[in-house]
Image (cartoon, helix red, strand yellow):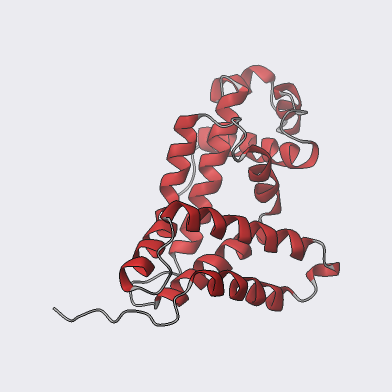
Amino acid sequence: MRRTPALEKRATILKAALHLFARQGVTNTSTAEIAREANIAAGTLFLYFPTKQDLLDQLAIQIGKEQSEYIRSMLNPYLSCEETFYIIWRGTIEWFIEHMPAFQYLQQVRDTGLISEAAVLESSSFFDYYYNAIQKGLAEGCIKPYSLGLIGDILYQDIVAVINHIKRQPAFEGYEEIVRQGFEIFWKGIKTDSPRLLKEE
């Protein structure tokens, strides 16, 4: 579906904001600079985003939505527990590598209070597949009975560690092997030695 001029303008502003936030930092970027980057008047920017907070929030929500859509397109209920986790792992890394400004932006605002609680809740709702996978693994006895929240946090932070390691390699050398090894480290830490077989109804 073709976007309306208003939606195009909104997308242009968000793109300009993301570019500047990634390049020079959220706190070092003014709305005036974003307006110049988007090639619009400051007053026009405020028609779409009345405050810088609105920009920060909507950018986080948009990134969450786009990233989750990419990963959901690869998931299906017939995958094993390990396959499901690997797709989430690999898909998240792939998406961030292809959208590095989004990764840099989220690292600045995650857990910092820069994003409103409402925006955190809305963007978090896109990632229910993280917790669905964990709950499935716990129910099937494929993973150790650790806290759901703890596994989710470690999964995300391990993904961030792998992305940062990849970024340090010349031309992302060894990308595939690093992704595989990183997942192996994560998976060995949470998997059980003998998964429980589910009884057929």
- Which of these two is toward me, 31 or 2? 31
Above or below: residue 40 compared with residue 23: above
Q: Position of residue 48 (x, y in %)?
A: 55, 25
Q: Report the quarter where the C terminus lies.
A: bottom left
Extreme top residue here? 43
User: Is residue 50 positioned above or below 64 on the image?
Assistant: above
User: Residue sitting at 17 percent across and 81 percent down?
Assistant: 200
Q: Toward which corner of the image does residue 32 lie, by quadrant?
A: top right
Point out residue 195 in the picture as x, y percentages from the top left corner: 37, 80
Q: Nearer the viewer, residue 179 or 62?
A: 179
Viewer-nearest residue: 32 or 1:
32
Q: Is residue 80 left or right of residue 14?
A: left
Horizontal and vertical percent position of residue 2: 48, 47
Q: Nearer the viewer, residue 198 or 21?
A: 198
Locate residue 168 relative to residue 40 in the image: left or right: right
Residue farthest right in this picture:
170
Where is residue 139 shown, x and y percent of the image? 31, 68
Q: Residue at x 67, y 60 (%)?
A: 98
**Residue lying at 47% horizontally and 74% vertically, measured from the top left:** 191
Please count the marks in the image.
Answer: 0
Q: Residue at x 50, y 61 (%)?
A: 70
